[in-house]
Image (cartoon, rainbow, N blue to C red):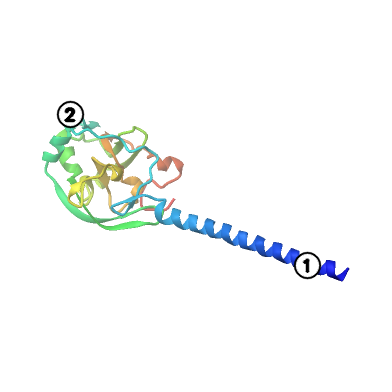
Amino acid sequence: MNKEKGSGSISEFISRRKFLAYLGIFLGIIIAGLAFLKTEGIKTINGFRIRSIEQTPSFDPETWKLTLDGLVESTLQISYKELLDLESDEQVTDFHCVEGWAVDKVKWKGVRLGVLFNMAGVKSDAEFVTFHSASGLYNDSLSIIEAREMDVLLAYMMYDEPLPLENGGPLRLVMPRMFGYKNVKWVNRITITKSQEIGYWERFGYKIDGVSYP
């Protein structure tokens, strides 16, 4: 009887060892997988994490247009070539995402909003400007005073190269002192309004001021 009990104990001990070994292998696979997702699962370009509610749109420089409409004296339709020929500026500014990550000292080149406002002739009762992405799904807005701040830019170049599509090319808004959700990518339409339009993420609780955490 004692021998049988002893055999049973040895068998149980071996089974427990196998179970713990398999458990260790399983947990190791899980940990390795999580590490992979942390380092490789999020695509980055120029330090920016590439995540969006939209698919990256296609871009044809021969047919692309930027429209500026709303409370203006004359609606603008600007081709990509015409955009590149406008008075331009360069700046180096930091980018901050509301999720807690940032990209320091990003070099941008593009057009100040004031250049376009002057071309279109913004009406006296205009107070806000809405930026629309090419998909028509995403938008966000600034006051005209905010849009005229000295480091607000419609950028078409990054680090001396054409702005990559996944970074918002051919044209994106750069508003350095506000979180990234205010920095609309793939801008192809700008509308001047009397009242402020609520942006995509602001409809889900994000702050319209762009500097306060949700």
The image shows residue 109 at horizontal and vertical percentages of: 18, 48
**Front one among 28 and 87:** 28
Q: Residue furthest right?
A: 1
Among the 4 quarters of the image, the one containing residue 194: top left
Say whether residue 165 is left or right of residue 5: left
Secondary structure under tag 2 reads loop
Count of marks, rendered view: 2
Residue depicted at 81% across the width and 69% down the height: 6
Say whether residue 5 is left or right of residue 152: right
Among the 4 quarters of the image, the one containing residue 186: top left
The image shows residue 31 at horizontal and vertical percentages of: 51, 59
Type of amino acid at the residue the image marks with label 2: Ser
- Label 2 and label 1: CA atoms lie apart by 90 Å
**Front one among 22 and 94:** 22
Q: Is residue 156 above or below residue 47?
A: above
Mark 2 Cα-neighbour bin, 10 Å: few <14, some 14–19, many ≥20 = some
| Residue 59 visible here | yes
The image shows residue 154 at horizontal and vertical percentages of: 22, 44
Residue depicted at 58% across the width and 57% down the height: 26
The image shows residue 196 at horizontal and vertical percentages of: 34, 38
Secondary structure under tag 1 reads helix
Q: Quadrant of the N terminus?
A: bottom right
Mark 1 Cα-neighbour bin, 10 Å: few <14, some 14–19, many ≥20 = few
Type of amino acid at the residue the image marks with label 1: Ser
Residue depicted at 17% across the width and 32% down the height: 78
**Front one among 59 and 108:** 59
- Disc number lying in front (2 or 1): 1
Residue 179: image tag: none
Residue 9: image tag: 1
| Residue 71 visible here | no
Residue 74: image tag: 2
